[in-house]
Image: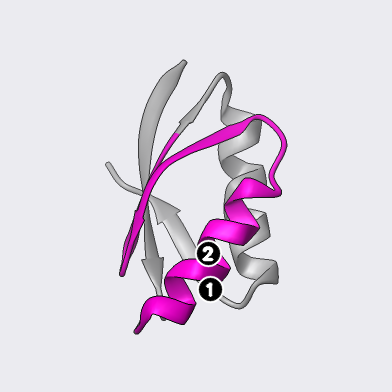
């Protein structure tokens, strides 16, 4: 499994952390390691899953991008 970090815009509080965690946990193939304000550290087997995680966050109201 590859580990990656997503930078997430629009997070301000503990409720945001909870919503982001729920959105990521609902994404098939993603293992959530840590969620904090502004970022999430995840594990996944493939790139399409990264895109699915970003899409789930967009649906929850947050913009995200893969940290380089």
Relative side of 56 to 41, left or right: right
Instruction: Determine the residue positioned at 37% across, 27% down.
Output: 3
Q: Is residue 16 magenta?
A: yes
> In 3D space, how far apart are the residues under numbered discs 2 and 1 (Cα atoms)?
8 Å
Is residue 11 visible in this depiction of the protein? Answer: no
- Asked whether the beta carbons under mark 2 and mark 1 sit within 8 Å of each other, the answer is yes
Q: Return the x and y of residue 10 as percentages of the image width and height.
A: 41, 81
Residue occupying image coordinates x 62% and y 47%: 25
- Which residue range is magenta in the image? 13-42
User: What's the residue at 56%, 19% (across, down)?
Assistant: 45
Residue 36 image-quadrant placement: bottom left
Asked which secondary structure carries label 1, the reply is: loop
| Position of residue 29 measured from the top left corner of the image (x, y, whole percent) | 66, 29
Under tag 2, what secondary structure? helix
- What number is the disc on residue 62? 1
What numbered label is drawn on residue 20? Answer: 2
Where residue 60 sits, quadrant-wise, is bottom right
Q: Which mark is residue 27?
A: none
Picture layout, residue 47 above or below residue 60: above
Q: Is residue 64 left or right of residue 37?
A: right
- Residue 51 left/right relative to 28: left
Pointer 2 or 1: first along the chain: 2
């Amino acid at each position: 499994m590859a580990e990656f970090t997503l930078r997430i815009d629009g997070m301000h509080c503990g409720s945001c952390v909870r919503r982001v965690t729920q959105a990521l946990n609902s994404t098939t193939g993603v293992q959530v390691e840590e969620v904090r304000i502004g970022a999430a550290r995840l594990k996944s087997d493939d790139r399409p899953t990264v895109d699915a995680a970003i899409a789930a966050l967009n649906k929850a109201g947050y913009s995200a991008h893969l940290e380089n």
